[in-house]
Each structure stands twice: as structure tokens, then as C-alpha cells.
Amino acid sequence: MKTWFITGASRGFGQVWTTAALDRGDRVAATARNPEALAGLKEKYGDRLLPIGLDVTDRANVFAAVNEAATTFGRLDVVVNNAGYGLFGMVEETTEAQARAQIDTNLFGALWVTQAALPVLRAQGSGHIVQVSSIGGIAAFPGLGLYNASKWALEGMSEALAQEVKPLSLRVTIVEPGPYGTDWSGDSAVRATPLDAYEPVREARRAGASARAPRDPSVTAHALLTLVDLDEPPLRLFLGEYPYAIAESAYRQRQETWQQWRDLAETA
């Protein structure tokens, strides 16, 4: 039996993974801004589910939630930083408030949970932190600049974290999903006020997006459960086949550009 702490558990990946963990007999401290949304799971799984109301941007609230989970269950084995949302808008269109809120949730929310959980995991001498990034944490897309920024920052922080905690027998995995039918682009998304100048860019993005249908997020459950059971989990794991072509193209273009301009770079 593993004990999980999952943020953003009331919908999307969080709900899928919470249910999958409970179905196999694990215990889950499941957080959501509206914990009443977890009432159905609580009724079904009883004391193996601990619903906790949590706004991950509130650091004090985060520490209290992690303490409640650790006190109730006695330990934490898997910490999943899943809470987040999409901010849609060109860089010029994005307001200061929208940009700060995006970083506060997608980056600082994960940072606060990680900082709160680490003392518990260190005391145990074991634990696995799963940071939910995106293919957008590897490659950037027009209209998602601040979302990309939040996930690129999460990846950098998490890669350093993995090196810091490995000697303590703690593990970190950055999960990078492709497009799934979560609420990421639905009701939880924020959209900047569009400027007419960028309409051709938006139109090209819409044309590309219409060619692929998002997959059902429930198909990710097996991969996530397998991941957290590994003795030596990877630092990074794609979810789905879609991210491979995007990542391979992005890294190939970077290598080509770096080499093309190497002579100039080495003059510096």
C-alpha cells in the first residue's frame, strides 16, 4: 500500500490518478480548491481518501495540508504536483495579473508542495515526487508563452531537485503529457484579450489543433502506477506517443542552430 498526496485531484489527470490509486488499494490525500467535488470518491473509498481543500498558491495553506496528510496517514510515498491550468494568449496580449497568476500556480504551487513534503520524505528515507509538466515544458508554442514559461521553469527546478535529493534516496520524475481531454483548455483555462494583429497566428494554431483529437486521460493511469512502483524511476517520462515527434524536432533544431553559429559563439 502506497500513500499519495495529489494536488488538483478533482478533475483531469488528478482525478484519474486518484481513482486509479484508490482502486488498487492505496491511500490518497487528495487536494482541490473545492474539496466537495471529491465527495463521491470519499463515499466510495472511505478512510483511504483524505479530501483537503487547498489553494496551492497559499504557501502556509500548502504546509498545513501536507502536515495534515502526513499526520493522518503516518507517511507519504508519492507526491504528485498536478495542480495547474493553461493561460492562452500571445506574449504581448498577456496582462501582468495573468502572467503572475500563471507562474504562482504552475511553478510556485509545485515549489511550495515540494518544500512542504521534503522534510517528511527525508525523515522516512524514501519517497517519489512526480512533477506534472507538459510537452509544452520542452517545446514552446505561439499563444502559450507564459504557460510554456511556467513549465520550463518547473522542469529546470525539478532537474536540479532530482540531483539534490538522490543521495537522500528520494526520487523525482518530470511527467510530460501530450494533448489529453482534461480541463486544461476548458473551464479552468484563462484567455487573454486578443489583439487583431495576431489573428493569422491564431488561425494557423487552430488549423493544426483541429487535426488531432485529445485522448481520454484515463489511459494514462497504467503508466503512472507503473512509474511510481519502479525502484529506479526515470527523471523524465512522456505520456502518449505525441510528444516524441515534437521533442525530437525541437532538439534537432537546437543542435543545428548551435552548430551553425558555433564559429560566432566561440569568438565571445
Image: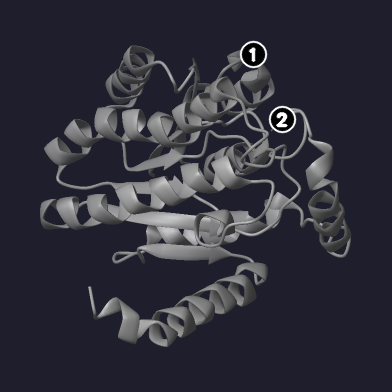
Disc nearest the viewer among 2 and 1: 2
3 to 240, vertically: above or below: above
Residue drawn at (56%, 31%), measured in percent from left and top? 8
Question: Label 2: few (<14), some or many (≥20) within 10 Å?
Answer: some
Label of residue 36 in the image: 1
Quarter that holds the C terminus: bottom left
Q: Is residue 221 left or right of residue 73?
A: right
Label 2 residue SS: loop
137 to 146, vertically: above or below: below
Label of residue 192 in the image: 2
Considering depth in this image, is 240 or 153 the residue closer to the camera?
A: 153
**Is residue 30 among the parts visible in the rendering?**
no
The picture places residue 65, in percent across and down from the top left corner, at 37, 18
156 to 246, vertically: above or below: above
**Is residue 214 among the parts visible in the rendering?**
yes
Distance from the alpha carbon under mark 2 to that under mark 1:
29 Å
Which of the 4 quarters of the picture holds residue 33? top right
Quarter that holds the N terminus: top left
Considering depth in this image, is 160 or 174 the residue closer to the camera?
A: 160
Q: What's the residue type where badge 1 is placed? A: Glu
Which of the 4 quarters of the picture holds residue 255? bottom left
Which of the 4 quarters of the picture holds residue 196? top right
Q: What's the residue type where badge 2 is placed? A: Ala
- What is the tally of numbered marks visible in this picture? 2
Residue drawn at (53%, 24%), measured in percent from left and top? 101
